[in-house]
Image: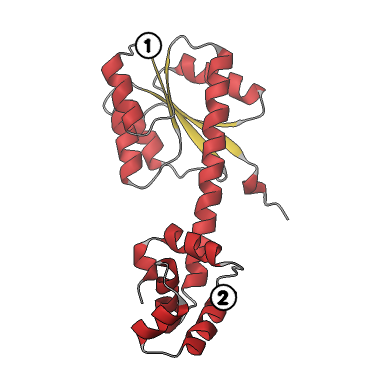
Amino acid sequence: MTRADDTHQTVIVVDDDPLVREGLDNLLRSVGLSVTLFASADEALECALPPGDCCYIIDVRMPKIGGLDLQASLLKRGDRRPVIFMTGHGDIPMSVRAMKAGADDFLIKPVRDQDLLDAVAAALARARTGRLEMAHVDEARHRYSSLTSREREVMQGVVQGLMNKQIAGNLGLSEITVKLHRANLMRKMALTTIADLVRTGELLGTDSTQA
């Protein structure tokens, strides 16, 4: 069953110009997107994010907290949703800084409607991919937490590319016992091949393969 949040898409607009906010609101809603409007970076940082896939459209030059500083604050609190910058005062160093910090696009006002919609579509697609990948990681972590310490040790050996005999020698176990532990951890992790196990171990990171 598909949850409503799986298909809900929202564009978060942060711009101090009310005319720009109104124009973007009308344009984005005309193609079926939900829109959340903020007049300042402070407002955006204070509010909870809507559910589903989101991306930001942020004006670079705003009073108090500018767009690049807002992006830095979002990253600092772990918000890695795609960011599209808009500005009427763009320059090469500014755009380079934004892209290095992870911005998806950097558009110079006035922006053609189709160019903006294309940038938003790409950003929302990236947001969806990131959300699905994170859900996969969370599921893998949940399953990993159910493993015994010995099963984690065996998993570590498999991820490192060791044979059953080598793992058995390292852990002081019989090869049959290692095979039993491996079969149990494969079942708990809901995996069917060693390649899947290795990919999952790499996905979880080195800390997760420690006993």
Q: Is residue 131 visible?
A: yes
In the depicted view, which residue is nearer to us: 54 or 162?
162
- The picture places residue 175, in percent across and down from the top left corner, at 47, 86
Figure check: 86 above or below 45: above
- Tell me which residue sits at (38%, 60%) in the image: 205
- Whichever of callouts 2 and 1 sits on the residue coming sooner in the sequence is 1
Number of labelled discs?
2
In the depicted view, which residue is nearer to us: 200 or 73?
200
- The picture places residue 118, in percent across and down from the top left corner, at 57, 22
Q: Nearer the viewer, mark 2 or mark 1?
A: 2
Regarding mark 1 in the picture, which secondary structure is present there?
loop
- Tell me which residue sits at (44%, 29%) in the image: 104
The residue identified by callout 2 is 188
- The picture places residue 156, in percent across and down from the top left corner, at 40, 72
Q: Amino acid at mark 1?
A: Gly
The residue identified by callout 1 is 88
Regarding mark 2 in the picture, which secondary structure is present there?
helix
Task: Indicate left or right for 71 with 129 as reference.
Answer: left
